[in-house]
Image (spheres, rainbow, N blue to C red):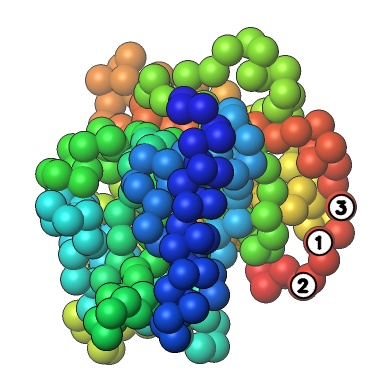
Amino acid sequence: MKDPTSILRNAAGLVLVAMSIYGMGCAVEAGDVHADLDEENLGEAVQGAAGYPGTLNHLRYQVLHNHGVQHTTRALGAAALANQSGLLTSMPYMPAPDATGPMAGARVEYLEILIGCALPAGTSVRDPAHITGYLYLFGTSTPLYRVYAGEIGLAPDWRTRGLTTVEKQLVTACVLQRTNRFGEEVEIMLEGNHPAITRTEADKLLYPGIESRAWGNMFDSTIPLSTTNSELDATDAPFNAYICHETASCPTGVPGILRQCDAMDACGFIYLGNCTDHMKYCNYRWLHNLPAPQSCTQFNYNILASLKEADTVCQIPPGPDPNL
């Protein structure tokens, strides 16, 4: 990583420019001072918001399962994520930046997680459909677009080509593990079959609460969507998401760990019980040349989520669980 002071130097320079522009009767809207930082520094400034090797878990499962979101996901995975200027492709079915109601904030919430899982730190893309302000200079206005920074790096080449099947499974598993049952923000560590999430023993000591494994492939799902068939129920799960628990779930009646999706009827995932038992089931079918279900064929690219010790205590969430 670069000397962190380089970020401060760039930011300081931009502030001076903004002040000078303001003095000429022009302005940059609040919150957009970072817009002209080069992509590499911007990625370094925001990646690993929870602190390496941790990441944040806060995606609402209602956003994940939204049919417009999943229509967009399938389209994005089939091609390069952005053009040569780093601009995201058109996303007509994605909730709008100014959406209200249950999908308020969904666009940023989802793309932040999806792109953070896929792209590595130091890279970013911009959403031309989400203008956050304008830069006025010498009578000309330039739109400032919402920036999404890479963080984990499970599909580093997605900016320039479509995803491979393995990348689709890894990114899906990452998004699943960053989904939160209660919409709360909890710090987790991800571990799996990829160099970007291979952990040392020292890392594991920081996150001793081994919680769950999640896997699937939302990009290649063929489940019909309400975006293309208005007669379909838009609340039906648009892809098969699998999860199993490594440690016991909280007692019945106690909603539990604030991020918990590894329980029956939680987060819209297919809950398969204890991970060890599921692995034994899959191994038995393979050893005896029996047909293996999708929950077995995609299991190789599951991702394990672990928690800090302070977050492993079963507790009543701050708000009602819509599943109870």
Seen from the viewer's position, the closer of residues 271 and 31 is: 31
> Disc 3 marks which amino acid?
Gln
**Left or right relative to 314: residue 94:** left
Q: Distance between the residues labelled 3 and 1?
A: 6 Å
Say above or below: 289 vs 275. Answer: above
Relative image position of residue 257 (x, y in whole percent): 76, 48
Which sits in the foreground, 119 or 15? 15
- What crowding class fits label 2: few (fewer than 14 Cα within 10 Å), some (14-19), or many (20 or more)? few
Q: Is residue 218 above or below residue 70?
A: above
Residue 62 against residue 212 in the figure, above or below: below
- Residue at coordinates 69% horizontally, 48% vertically from top-left? 186
Residue under numbered circle 1:
317
Horizontal side of residue 53 vs 116, given as left or right: right
Q: Are marks 2 and 1 in contact (CB under 8 Å)?
A: yes
Look at the image and tell me whether residue 208 can be seen: yes
For mark 2, what is the residue?
Answer: 320
Q: Residue at coordinates 57% horizontally, 24% vertically from top-left? A: 276
Please report the residue visible at 36 percent of the width from the left and 75 percent of the height from the top.
135
- 118 versus 236 height, above or below: above
Report the residue that reaches farthest toward the top. 201
User: The residue under label 2 is which amino acid type?
Assistant: Pro
State the CA–CA distance, disc 3 to disc 2: 12 Å
Residue underneath mark 3? 315
Q: Are marks 3 and 2 in contact (CB under 8 Å)?
A: no
Residue 173 pos. (x, y %): 43, 42
Contact (Cβ within 8 Å) of mark 3 with mark 1: yes
Q: What residue type is labelled 1?
A: Pro
